[in-house]
Structure formats: structure tokens, C-alpha cells
Image (spheres, helix red, strand yellow):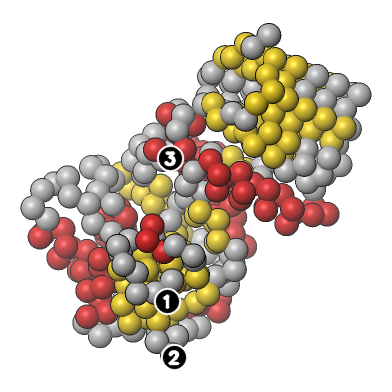
Amino acid sequence: MKVIIPVAGIGSKLRPHTHTQPKALVPVAGKPILSHIIDQQLIQGADDFIFIIGYLGDKIEGYVRSRYPKLRASFVVQEPRRGTGHAVWTARDYVRSGDELLIILGDTIVDFDLKAIRNYPHSALGIKKVSDPRQFGVAEVNDEGLIIRVKEKPAIPKSNFALVGVYYIRESDLLFNSLGEIHKKQESDSDEFSLTDAIEIMLAKGIRFCSFITGNWFDCGNKESLLLTNATLLKRMGKDLREYSFPDSIIIQPTVIGTNCRINNSIIGPDVSIDENTIIESSIISNSIIGSYSHISTAVLHHSIIGSDASLKGLSQSLNIGDSTEIDFS
């Protein structure tokens, strides 16, 4: 089985952080989004990965090769970037005829049981009920749990089951043929097409898709969802969190702090993730994500994301500032 992870997008909703790093490498609960995805699949037995890279793709490849040196990994450049369907289609030469596929979107952390899914009699799509499905691919499901229709971001949804970005495909040959059909029909080289479009074709040709209800689904596409994901994952880590001791400081759990950090005269937590080699002095920080090699002094932060190599002094506010930023409010 091949695991395909599209991570070529520019992550415009997470700017300014994605000006200098790909969205999949934005940290949450102590490690990048991409690491949460890879680690989950390694635990479940997956061992052959294809990463679809594009924007700042060299950073994705460098991170995976250094963090997972023994991982069987291929890297495919999607250029131009024309949607999720096009992203998967670019991997066609890396998949053997008859291979099973597990496709996981690279900005989504989803709880699911891979072994159970592989025991299904058909291909399968992950779904979850949402209050407003218009911003997602939408699946219509019959009484037997089979998917009968899918539609990408419909103006008038006929179901409140959103596709969560996990696709288990048995018929990989037909999937790539369907994606190829769509690609040939595009009037412009800049037209985008989604993976959902190909699944619609497969359904029309009689391929059956089971549905599976996912557990936690974290869509890390913007600041609000990223902070919510960070807080939820930290709480879930529970007893696995380290106990920290820093001079004249209070650390309120759940909080995760990277290696080689210096924290003095501060109150940190709850729901805080701090990356490595960061210095925090005389500050109060809660519900926030702080990047590596940053320096924060005499600040009160809540509901904030601070990028790597950032410098901040003297502020009580909610912020969303990117890498290599320097702010002095003193």
C-alpha cells in the first residue's frame, strides 16, 4: 500500500507563517502537522510514502529525510499546482498497477483505524457530520453506509457529511484513469480539479465506496483551527507530558516545551506549545504556539501564534506574526 500525502499548497490562510515555511511544517502540540500524520501511519503499519511537494518543497523533503532517515519516501513536484486531484495524478508513475492507496491531505490530522478500513469490502472515504458542509467535499450516504454521491463544496449541500481528507482506494488504476480523463478535458493549464471529481467518475462507473466515521478531525487550515488543534492534542497527551522546572517560573499543564529553551520569571500555560531554543523572560503566555529560536520579553500573550526567529518585547495582546519578525512595544 502506498500512502500519498499532498503538501504542495501555499497555505494562504495561515499567512504570515507560510511565507517562510510550508503549512505542513507549522508546529502544533510540539511537532509539525506533517509529523502527526506520518507518526500516526507508522504506528499503524504503513511504510511506503509519496509526498506531493510544491511551494517550499525543499523544506518538506529536508525535514522528512532528516527526521525520518529510514522512511521509504518518494517526493513528487506538483507544478503548476492545480488542486488535490492534480496533486494525486502527479504521483501516477510512482504507483504500481493494482497498488492500494491511502491518500491523506497534508493539513489534516484525523483519528482513524487503518487496519479496520483495509478489511472493508470496498474502497472507503472518511466522513464526519459538520454544521456547515459548504466549505468541504460532501458525501451522500445510503442506509447501508455506502457513498452514493460526492460533491466538492456544493452551494446547496444535500448532506451534512463532510469528506475529512482521508481516502482509501483499492482501484488505483481506475482512479488515475479518471484523473487523467479530467486532466485531458481541462481547457486551461491553470484550471484546478479536485480528487472528489475523480471519485464522482468512479461512482458513475459502478465502483463502491464504504464510508467510515472518523474520530477527532483537526483541519489545521487557519489560525483558529490551529490553536484549537494545539489545545486539544495537548490535553489528549495527558500524563505523557513532561514536568518542567524553570527559575522563578510557573508552568501550567498542558504545555510542551522544546529542548534548549530558557524561561525566567514567567507563567506559561495552559495550552502552550514552545519550540526549541526559545527564550522567554518576564512574560505570561497561554493558549499559544511559539516557534523556535524566538525571544519574548515582558509580554502578555494569549490566543497567539509566534513564528520562528521572532523577537517580541513589551506587549499585552493577541498576535499572529510570522518568522523572522521583530516587534518592540516597550
Q: Which residue is mark 3?
A: 13
**Which amino acid type corresponds to the residue marked 1 in the rendered image?**
Ala
Q: Quadrant of residue 239?
A: bottom right
The reply to whether dot 2 and dot 3 touch (C-beta < 8 Å) is no
Residue at 64 percent across and 23 percent down: it is: 293
Q: Report how far apart the C-alphas of labels 1 and 3 lie in the structure.
A: 29 Å
Residue at 59 percent across and 68 percent down: it is: 215
**Which amino acid type corresponds to the residue marked 2 in the rendered image?**
Glu
Q: Is residue 288 left or right of residue 93?
A: right
Residue 83: % across, % down: 28, 52
Residue at the outermost bottom position? 144
As rendered, which of 26 and 148 lies closer to the eye? 148
Q: Which residue is mark 1?
A: 124
**Which of the marked residues, 2 or 1, is nearer the chain's N terminus?**
1
How would you rate the neighbour count of disc 2 (Cα within 10 Å): few for under 14, some for 14-19, many for 20 or more? few
Residue at 55 percent across and 70 percent down: it is: 214
As rendered, which of 18 and 36 lies closer to the eye? 18
Q: Nearer the viewer, mark 2 or mark 1?
A: 2
